[in-house]
Amino acid sequence: MSISIERLEENLRQLRLVETAKELANILKDAERKSLTYRELILKLTSYELQKRDEKNIARLLNWARFPYLKTLNEFDLSKQQSLTKRQLKELEELSWLEQMFNIILLGPPGAGKTHLAIGIGLEAIQKGFQVAFVTMGDLVYMLKNEEYVKSSQVRLKRIRKTDLLIIDDLMYMAMDQREANFLFHLINHLYEKSSIILTSNKSPEQWTELIGDEGITTAILDRLLHRVEVINLNNDSYRMKHRESIFNN
């Protein structure tokens, strides 16, 4: 009995093996040329579908992340850093800290590589299937203040609250009023022990009170951020918080 390619393609589509249906003719030609066994052909078909699904999932996660640009950890220049070793960068890349819901604070002046390092870590997390969101402090404050009225802010913040890793770039680059500080606290409180956060800033945690202006809110924010944290001061010695667990193996 002769079975048409079209019928096989339709069956695959009904089984929601859409990518395999599109490539079926080429896969079968390759199987004939290489004289694949039935098992090898089934493996090839299923592997192709899984590969395409992984690629589509990564593309979707990248779209959700909203990175301003793509820079990998392999492109990060360790030779210019005093506070990170090659081994420590590898530990960040392995993401065991993300599974344990550690936070990372990256300190340093403009051009020190804070954002590059944060994006590189975010890309590694996406490759491993984690949901990542990148947002600047300015955009985050705008969305939090307008969530009640702006649909795009509602959609974006809904994803941020469900994310595995939130990257906030340029934290404390400007002073915040009490209302904005409250919004930030409630977001961080929501993510506490559910997600990891990477913060980049040119201000150390000790300076945040003067920018937030409310010591109580600042303390509450720091309590949640610094529970499990690695604070890395790029272009300087690593800044270690006393009595805090560390990502890096000593």
Image (tube, rainbow, N blue to C red):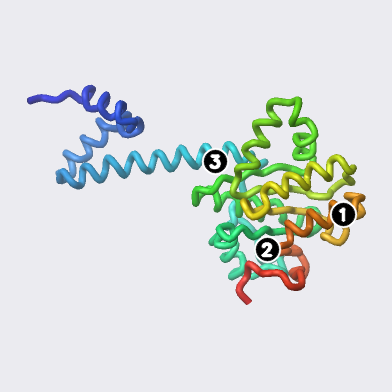
Image position of 90 (left or right of 209): left
- Amino acid type of the residue tagged 2 in the rendering: Arg
User: x%, y% of residue 128?
Assistant: 49, 51
- Counting residues from the start of the chain, the first of labels 3 and 1 encountered is 3
Which residue is at 61% across, 68% downward?
Answer: 88
What is the distance, in whole Å, between disc 3 and disc 1 at their CAs?
Answer: 36 Å
What residue sits right under mark 2 in the picture?
228
What residue sits right under mark 3 in the picture?
61
In terms of depth relative to the viewer, which is nearer, 79 or 119? 119
Which residue is at 14% across, 25% downward?
Answer: 3
User: x%, y% of residue 146?
Assistant: 78, 30
Q: As drawn, which residue projects farthest toward the bottom?
A: 250
User: x%, y% of residue 58?
Assistant: 50, 42
Q: Secondary structure at mark 3?
A: helix
Which residue is at 62% across, 38% downward?
Answer: 159
Image position of 3 (left or right of 196): left
Front position among marks 1 and 2:
1
- Counting residues from the start of the chain, the first of labels 1 and 2 encountered is 1
In terms of depth relative to the viewer, which is nearer, 12 or 41? 12
- Amino acid type of the residue tagged 1 in the rendering: Gly
What is the distance, in whole Å, between disc 2 and disc 3 at their CAs?
Answer: 26 Å
What residue sits right under mark 1 in the picture?
216
- Amino acid type of the residue tagged 3 in the rendering: Leu
Q: Residues within 10 Å of mark 2 (few under 14, many from 20)?
A: many
Which residue is at 88% across, 49% downward?
Answer: 212
Looking at the rendering, which quadrant does residue 104 occupy?
Answer: bottom right
Image position of 196 (left or right of 17): right
What is the distance, in whole Å, between disc 1 and disc 2 at their CAs?
Answer: 20 Å
- Counting residues from the start of the chain, the first of labels 2 and 3 encountered is 3
